[in-house]
Image: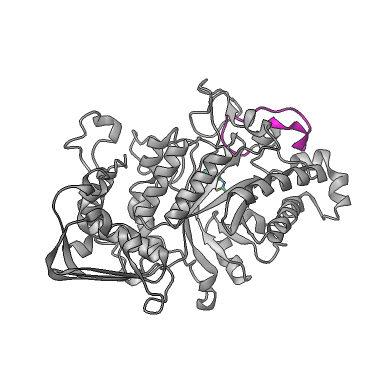
């Protein structure tokens, strides 16, 4: 296998021409600012071309993102040691000679990182952005609010983080069965406005868009704990320490809309993404039935089932007035009155994505059956994650983002796909590594590489021989393909089985 066959994600075309090129300044070579931009020669978004001869390297890109991709491909061609930041400034380096022509299959190559269930410190988020960049992924969906924690400082409402960012413990097993015992270890944290500006700028410099999520009208118990008047029942609640779907939802009042409009104004100030996610998933209607029947009638809604749509429409109008689009989980289609322009995140399978695309909506494919990376990776009794279907790296690799049976003239509605890293059972960045990698490497190829260039038969071999050494060099604590799990061999890192 020549070096051009080891690239991940696999390029549109790559061939070896034999021989090598000596590199005297690898740091400059892998700096995107040295790449020539030529949008006429390379009109496709994010495209780049490499020509490596014994005399030198010619790197051309269609745009700045393409230049970054060119630099990332060159780093892979330099070999795994080029991923050790300290090493790249010293020593002798060579590149294999050859030609690469490349651009991504989809514009939305996303990863959701759930920082609400388990807070990820800023440094961990920045590191995660670097890992995404190395895999040519370009959308970081930050799940910032949920029942178990509110992670974004909002100056107008300090209790959101003073109260809402902290819980007294975490449920450690599967879903709760009524018995709400927890581990007794307080958990929390939040990002200041300065932190978030830094994260957004850091991502932008790597051509990654950070899409913020503020989940309404369900998954809101942490906000209700901070400001009980937001809640549909009016009763005081704690930040939740269990997992699952909380019955505590937002009240369908003007006060709540005003409150969230102010929250969104802050979000719009901090995040520059053209898209904001308003959640909309898993909303129990019981509290509206009990406490807000008159209000639902006054709003002219047929039933409580229409309340989530009312939230989405009302807050989505505010986003649209500021030039941003709304992203919602596919539950937002259940009431059948989805406003035009809303992007649907198809998570309960492919059906919602197909239906939304046929109805003229843009969609991001996130089916839990394929790309939920919080799910277990094997049936082994020592596999640490207690939930979900078994999803192996091969399963993720086999996924195709175009829903089965979607007519060709609607394919352009599929913006791409997104892997989800929910963190109920990942208690810190190390466990996030374990869940994300190497499955996220397989996902990177799903969203980047044209179908005819995918290699289901050879992928795992390529991964084991060539990409896991890159992840080792990056210090990623991935799940090995076989053998002991990382914590079963500590501290014996050398000779660890992949
Ligand atoms: C469903 S995906 C959820 C999340 C959970 C996840 C666990 C979605 C929109 N809702 O709140 O974290 O399952 O796999």
Q: Is residue 62 left or right of residue 257?
A: left
Look at the image and tell me whether residue 90 can be seen.
yes
Q: Is residue 452 left or right of residue 310?
A: left
Instruction: Tell me where residue 447 appears, x and y as whole percent.
Output: 41, 62
- The image quadrant where one finds ligand 1 is top right
Label the magenta part by its dominant secondary structure: loop
Q: Nearer the viewer, residue 495 or 35?
A: 35
In the picture, the quarter occupied by the N terminus is bottom left
Left or right of 463? Residue 346 is right
**Range shown magenta:** 226-245
The one nearer the camera, 445 or 62, is 62
- Position of the C terminus, as image quadrant, is top left
Residue at figure coordinates x 21%, y 45% from the top left: 87
Residue 140 vertical placement versus 182 (above, below): below
Give the residue at the far left of this rendering.
Answer: 19
Q: Could you tell me residue 164's position as x and y percent?
A: 63, 31
Residue 231 on the magenta segment = yes
Q: Residue 201: horizontal and vertical position, in percent? A: 49, 50
Question: Which quadrant of the figure has residue 288?
Answer: top right
Q: Position of residue 152 (x, y in %)?
A: 59, 39
């Amino acid at each position: 296998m020549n070096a051009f066959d080891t690239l991940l994600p696999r390029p549109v075309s790559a061939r070896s021409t034999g021989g090598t090129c000596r590199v005297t300044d690898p740091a400059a070579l892998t700096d995107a600012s040295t790449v020539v931009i030529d949008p006429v020669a390379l009109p496709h978004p994010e495209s780049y071309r490499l020509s490596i001869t014994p005399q030198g390297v010619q790197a051309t890109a269609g745009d700045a993102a393409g230049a970054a991709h060119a630099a990332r491909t060159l780093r892979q061609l330099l070999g795994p040691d080029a991923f050790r930041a300290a090493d790249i400034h010293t020593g002798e380096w060579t590149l294999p000679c050859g030609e690469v022509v490349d651009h991504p299959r989809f514009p939305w190559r996303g990863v959701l990182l759930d920082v609400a269930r388990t807070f990820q410190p800023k440094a961990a988020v920045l590191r995660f952005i670097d890992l995404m960049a190395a895999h040519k992924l370009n959308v970081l969906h930050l799940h910032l609010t949920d029942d178990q924690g509110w992670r974004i400082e909002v100056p107008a409402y300090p209790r959101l983080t003073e109260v809402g960012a902290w819980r007294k413990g975490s449920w450690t097993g599967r879903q709760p069965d009524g018995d709400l015992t927890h581990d007794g270890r307080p958990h929390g944290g939040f990002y200041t406005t300065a932190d978030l500006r830094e994260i957004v700028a850091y991502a932008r410099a790597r051509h990654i868009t950070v899409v913020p999520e503020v989940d309404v009208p369900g998954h809101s118990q942490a906000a209700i704990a901070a400001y009980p008047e937001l809640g549909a029942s009016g009763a005081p609640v704690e930040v939740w320490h269990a997992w699952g779907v909380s019955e505590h939802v937002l009240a369908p009042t003007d006060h709540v809309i005003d409150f969230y409009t102010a929250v969104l104004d802050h979000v719009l100030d901090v995040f520059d993404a053209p898209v904001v996610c308003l959640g909309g998933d898993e909303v129990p209607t019981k509290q509206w039935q009990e406490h807000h029947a008159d209000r639902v009638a006054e709003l002219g809604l047929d039933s409580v089932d229409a309340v989530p749509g009312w939230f989405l429409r009302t807050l989505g109008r505010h986003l649209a007035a500021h030039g941003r689009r709304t992203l919602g989980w596919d539950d937002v289609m259940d009431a059948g009155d989805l406003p035009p322009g809303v992007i649907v995140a198809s998570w309960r399978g492919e059906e919602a994505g197909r239906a939304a695309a046929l109805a003229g909506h843009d969609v991001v494919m996130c089916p839990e059956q394929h790309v939920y990376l919080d799910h277990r990776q094997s049936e082994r009794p020592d596999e640490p994650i207690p939930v979900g279907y078994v999803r192996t790296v091969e399963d993720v690799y086999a996924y195709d983002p175009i829903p089965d049976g979607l007519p060709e003239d609607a394919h352009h509605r599929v913006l791409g796909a997104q892997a989800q890293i929910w963190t109920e059972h990942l208690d810190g960045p190390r466990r996030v590594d374990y869940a994300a990698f190497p499955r996220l490497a397989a996902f990177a190829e799903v969203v980047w590489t044209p179908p005819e260039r995918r290699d289901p038969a050879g992928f795992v071999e390529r991964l084991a021989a060539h990409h896991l050494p890159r992840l080792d060099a990056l210090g990623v604590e991935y799940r090995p393909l076989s053998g002991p799990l990382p914590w079963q061999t500590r501290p014996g890192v050398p000779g660890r089985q992949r």
